[in-house]
């Protein structure tokens, strides 16, 4: 077996949306990244057709929305659903269901182009095989991979991240526990041509199951078929269009055998989550860390958010600006977010896919959804904009641990959104009171934290700031600290800077502006 040393800070296994987003984040932070993908080329299949509101904000923060073919005004859907119960997401300020009609293949291409431009070495046709011992305590990770010619290669990096999906080999090789619930039913997904279908974009139940159908492009319909009583499929089993057509006919009575499928796939309602997202120098992200019933594009969107949460932290450790202990916060923050994801997708499955026994629950949801408080709660949950990380005793302000909403601030360069200030991948300190002490404090973190002296939003929108005159925002858009140094908070600001961005520089310089 040939021995090949790869000079990489991080090896990422898997070139799906999670792995590619992570590669881009790491490169943006100055890390050297190799991505190994067993497929020789993208499949072109698009299990996902969009992403949540929070994922859109993440893409916006890296300047990627304009790459989706619709400019920075990517088409959004104000209407969404929870378990098939439809409601208007605009009951929440800034909220919407997310982007619709963007095939996963396009999302992957956008992210692959971006990561490649930043320097990621994306190697297709390379398959992860095994992991050497010592990854918990060693100074690096040694692994074996099979190259496109079938030869086994020894590779080395300081860190390894498994983004290789629900059947993750990295997860198994590194010994991560993956408890949860086994699948109870099998379901189908297909893009169909050559038949006329009545559109059922939010699903339709019959005594035999549930189906969904919606136009994907000219002459192509996306169908989802969920027959009752169908046992769970083996993950590797090949599904045929005839099988899908039979299930469609059983549920609806409609004959679609005259059509054909561009591709077909299957999925289940299995629900599992890794016990840990980090073991030594090995991490999991995306479907490698959590699997669940697909509901509202949350899987892809959660994987993207996993990647951004881990990426800036790992890059900071690689640059030597922070200690490896910072990486523990990845598990703490994203494991809790994953638990909430699994809870809401399981709940939707019971409401959406349950038989007659779930009718009372569906009726109850129909009543509850009339209340604005319920709408706000559910909209925030499935759009991922209500997520709050637990920062312990540092949670001293209503904004702390939450993403900073996309408010518009006014500065010397005109009107700006927080996403525009995060394009570099650095943290940002918003000075909203033209406070020289705030700028002086941040000067000791030059290069890691930019400073923007801005005017807060109008009174109508300013309530989100709850009186804060300075806001420290992490590179992933979450608020690390908010308050008013003039009211006795300068020590807390300094503590937050040290916690998230490492020790201060010994020789302070002028704070670097954000714009």
Image: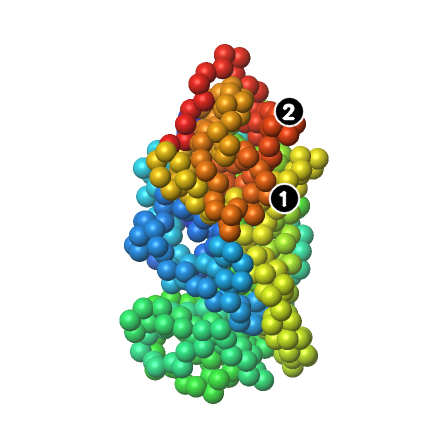
Foreground residue, 489 or 2? 489
Q: Can you tell which quarter of the image residue 262 is in? A: bottom left
Q: Can you tell which quarter of the image residue 478 is in? A: top right
Identify the image quadrant of the C terminus: top left
Identify the image quadrant of the N terminus: top left
Colouring mode (rainbow / by chain / secondary structure / one colour): rainbow
Element carrying mark 2: helix
Q: Is residue 203 above or below residue 396?
A: below
* Mark before the other along the chain sequence, 1 or 2: 1
Identify the residue at horizontal 69%, vertical 37% (top origin). 392
Foreground residue, 154 or 331? 331
Q: Position of residue 345 (x, y in %)?
A: 60, 62
User: Can residue 58 be seen in the rendering of this structure?
Assistant: no
Identify the residue at horizontal 50%, vertical 23% (top origin). 436
Q: Position of residue 30 (x, y in %)?
A: 42, 28
Q: Which mark is residue 398?
A: 1
* Residue at the farthest front position: 459
Identify the residue at horizontal 62%, vertical 69% (top origin). 371
- Local crowd size for mark 1, using a 10 Å CA cut-off: few (<14), some (14–19), many (≥20): some
User: Can residue 372 be seen in the rendering of this structure?
Assistant: yes
Q: Which residue is mark 2?
A: 491
* Residue at the farthest right position: 393
Q: Position of residue 386 (x, y in %)?
A: 58, 52
Element carrying mark 1: loop
- Local crowd size for mark 2, using a 10 Å CA cut-off: few (<14), some (14–19), many (≥20): few
Identify the residue at horizontal 30%, vertical 74% (top origin). 219
* Residue at the farthest top position: 507
Q: CA distance from mark 1 to mark 2?
A: 18 Å
Q: Which mark is residue 262?
A: none
Question: Are circles 1 and 2 on residues that touch, CB within 8 Å?
Answer: no
Answer left or right for 426 relative to 75. right
Q: Position of residue 105 (x, y in %)?
A: 36, 55
């Amino acid at each position: 077996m040939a021995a090949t040393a790869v000079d990489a800070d991080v090896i990422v296994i898997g070139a799906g949306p999670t792995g590619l987003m992570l590669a881009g984040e790491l490169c943006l932070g100055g890390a050297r990244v190799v991505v190994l993908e067993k497929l020789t080329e993208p499949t072109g299949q698009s299990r996902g057709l969009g992403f949540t509101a929070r994922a859109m904000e993440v893409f916006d923060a890296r300047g990627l929305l304009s790459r989706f073919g619709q400019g920075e005004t990517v088409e959004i859907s104000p209407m969404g659903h929870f378990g098939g119960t439809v409601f208007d997401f605009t009951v929440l300020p800034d909220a919407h269901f997310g982007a619709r009609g963007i095939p996963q293949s396009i999302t992957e291409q956008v992210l692959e182009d971006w990561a490649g431009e930043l320097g990621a070495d994306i190697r297709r046709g390379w398959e992860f095989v095994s992991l050497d011992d010592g990854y918990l305590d060693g100074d690096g990770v040694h692994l074996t991979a099979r190259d496109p010619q079938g030869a086994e290669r020894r590779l080395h990096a300081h860190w390894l991240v498994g983004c290789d999906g629900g059947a993750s080999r990295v997860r198994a090789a590194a010994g991560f526990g993956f408890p949860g619930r086994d699948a109870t039913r099998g379901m189908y997904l297909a893009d169909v041509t050559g038949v006329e279908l009545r559109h059922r974009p939010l699903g339709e139940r019959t005594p035999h199951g549930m189906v969904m159908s919606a136009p994907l492009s000219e002459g192509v319909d996306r169908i989802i078929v969920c027959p009752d009583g169908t046992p769970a499929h083996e993950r590797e089993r090949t599904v045929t269009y005839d099988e899908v057509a039979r299930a469609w006919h059983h549920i609806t009575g409609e004959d679609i055998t005259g059509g054909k499928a561009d591709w077909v796939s299957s999925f289940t309602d299995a629900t599992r989550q890794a016990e840990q997202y980090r073991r030594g120098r090995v991490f999991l992200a995306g479907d490698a860390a959590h699997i669940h019933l697909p509901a509202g594009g949350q899987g892809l969107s959660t994987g993207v958010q996993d990647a951004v949460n881990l990426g800036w932290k790992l890059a900071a450790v690689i640059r030597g600006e922070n200690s490896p202990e910072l990486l523990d916060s990845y598990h703490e923050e994203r494991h809790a977010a994953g638990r909430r994801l699994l809870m809401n997708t399981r709940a939707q499955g019971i409401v959406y896919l349950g038989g007659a026994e779930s009718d009372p629950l569906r009726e109850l949801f129909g009543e509850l959804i009339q209340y604005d408080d319920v709408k706000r709660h559910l909209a925030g949950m499935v759009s991922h904009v209500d997520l709050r990380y637990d920062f312990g005793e540092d949670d001293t302000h209503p904004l702390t641990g939450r993403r900073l909403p996309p408010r518009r601030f006014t500065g010397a360069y005109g009107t700006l959104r927080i996403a525009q200030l995060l394009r570099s991948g650095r943290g940002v300190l918003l000075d909203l009171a033209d406070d020289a002490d705030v700028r002086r404090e941040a000067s000791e973190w030059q290069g890691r934290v930019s400073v923007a002296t801005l005017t807060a939003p109008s009174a109508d929108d300013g309530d989100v700031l709850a009186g804060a005159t300075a806001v420290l925002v992490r590179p992933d858009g979450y608020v690390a600290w908010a308050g008013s140094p003039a009211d006795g908070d300068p020590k807390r600001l300094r503590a937050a800077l040290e916690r998230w961005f490492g020790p201060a520089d010994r020789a302070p310089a002028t704070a670097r502006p954000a714009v």
